Amino acid sequence: MKKNAFTLVELLAIIVIMASMLLIILPSINNTIKNSEEAKKQESLNSIYMAAENYVMANYDEYSSLDNIGSTEYVYIMDLINNGYLSIDTVNPNNDSVFNSKDVVKVTKQENGTFKFELDYIKNLISTLLEQYQEGNEVGLVKDETNPNLYYYTGTNEEVANNFLWYGGHQWRILEFDTEAKTLTLITQQPLTAIQPASSIWTTKEEYESSYIKTWLNDYFWNSLNSSIQNNILASTFNIGIYTDVDEITTTQKVGLLDEDQYKRAGEADSFLDIKDYFWLGNRHSSSYVRHVNHIGNLNGSGPSGSYGVRAVIKISDITIIEDSDGTIASSYRIANKATNTNNVQVGEYINVPYSGSDNACGDDNMCTFRVVSKDNDSIKVALNGLLPTTSQWADNANYNITTNDLIYTNVLNGFIENIDSKYITMGTYGVGMYESGNSYAVPQSTTITASIGLPTVGEMFSGNDIEVTTGSKIFVDVNTIENPFVSAYYWTMNRYSSSYVRDVYSNGTLSYSNPPLSHGIRAVIYLKSGTSTITFSTGEGTPNSPYVLQ
């Protein structure tokens, strides 16, 4: 009789064969599905990246920093959708979710000149700051009583400890922000220079427009800023009237000064705006004096021949910040951009220069921290972020223009420069003109010498007390970032006050003058190679706590 059914052994054999075939076939099927999904995901990413590239090219003025190798910019996905570069139903292929306002395409300029694109998400500064607000706050972040969209800071440094912003080579404090206009008002944490504000008191807008301090801010300082920073600064109204009626006179410009009402709103003496240094306000005190804050935080008036600190105030559009910053002085809010070499460094950024001397001039790491003062086509001028470990007389007298034969050169500066490798430095021009009462900040640069090393020139960036000098009380810097901060209460500049005195900077932030035989601190200034002799940075972010390091 013929059998029509499988035996148990035969069925088991068939099952084993089919299982073996599945083990062979399934991975292939899975790989095919996975490859198909990856291809689809990559296709979607490519579409997004192509949209981002087209958007950047169409709006390149806003992304001009991408001219620099290593620079990074962010393109909002919502901007791509709202401007028709992407479909409104586009989803994030990394998680199949709908894009939100924090999603961006990160665009980085690579060594070969092409752009690298990555999906990322960012934090807006304003939305991050709003997390500090609690209803009923009386100190810290406070809501304005008359404008529900305006928030401002008030209180001591303990109460306002997380409004530091590192932006465009400078440390700023955030004064206020507007959630509707999406703007922030900032003031430099440090005084940027020390100068006389005007030849005479301004009582009209026109007189203020020609003042030394106004032109310094909107000419010298403005031109020192990177174009990407300039493009984000908004013209705004500054109050320059008498201190009892600050908006008696107003002016519209890009960079201005703090007014008395803003200082009082922040808490006056011992507030986060009191830096224990003299600095100018934008108001006049009387028909003979300009209003200022003194070294103990009190408000007062002084004649325009006084030389005090200058702190810039600007208004910017909201910016995107990196994730690992928390707004404290050691971890300021900051954007992602950083330089890769001396060609694309920004004025104000910090650079570590190797030092071979055994005199401990720059600490145990033998790295001297400098700060960028200015740039030209072939070099960058940098000032030591602190003082050398010894004081020095200037010379026997100051009857003639300062030269490289003066005592301060032969005894101190020449010995210091010998310990910096010549591959890093170049000759530079130093302004040695006289800065007497009534002078413009530009006068000290009218007479120059050429040398391999010098000192700060009055009127240039960081020619005031932007560092800690001897007191231990400055709250605008982290003292651990300063070279030899307590060596002297004064440091010399390159300029005479008269035929008998040399200009110096005092620990309270004033520009003073002394007899040349006195011994003061030395703040070395050198020129680093740039242009066709560019020097690459091996590491660092250009901040006080993480300077770039020359390779």
Image (spheres, rainbow, N blue to C red):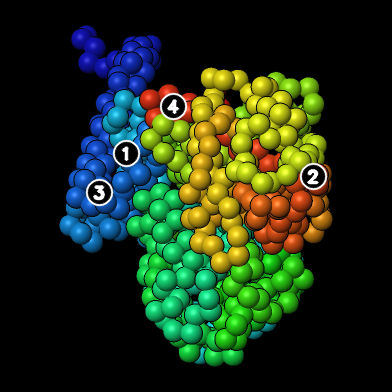
Give the distance between the C-alpha atoms of the residues marked 2 and 1, in whole angstroms.
Answer: 50 Å
Give the distance between the C-alpha atoms of the residues marked 1 and 4, in whole angstroms.
Answer: 16 Å
Residue that appears at 75% across and 57% down: 507
Residue that appears at 57% across and 45% down: 432
- Compared to residue 94, the image places residue 31 above or below, namely above
Determine which residue is flagged by label 1.
67
Depth order, front residue of 231/520? 520
Other-residue count near label 4 (Cα within 10 Å), few / some / many at <14 / 14–19 / ≥20: some
In which quadrant of the rendered image does the C terminus lie? Answer: top right
Residue that appears at 51% across and 29% down: 427
Q: Position of residue 262 (x, y in %)?
A: 58, 79
Choose top left, top right, bottom left or bottom right for residue 139: bottom right
Residue that appears at 68% across and 35% down: 406
Q: Which amino acid type corresponds to the residue marked 3 in the rendered image? A: Tyr
- Tell me which numbered mark, 1 or 4, is placed earlier along the sequence: 1
Secondary element at image label 3: helix
Determine which residue is flagged by label 3.
60
Mark 2 or 3: in front is 2
Determine which residue is flagged by label 4.
534
Q: Which amino acid type corresponds to the residue marked 1 in the rendered image? A: Asp
- Tell me which numbered mark, 3 or 4, is placed earlier along the sequence: 3
Other-residue count near label 2 (Cα within 10 Å), few / some / many at <14 / 14–19 / ≥20: some
Depth order, front residue of 432/468? 432
Q: Residue furthest top?
A: 1
Give the distance between the C-alpha atoms of the residues marked 3 and 4, in whole angstroms.
Answer: 26 Å
- Which mark, residue 517? 2
Depth order, front residue of 466/403? 403
- Compared to residue 32, the image places residue 381 above or below, namely below
Q: Which amino acid type corresponds to the residue marked 2 in the rendered image? A: Pro
Give the distance between the C-alpha atoms of the residues marked 4 and 2, in whole angstroms.
Answer: 39 Å
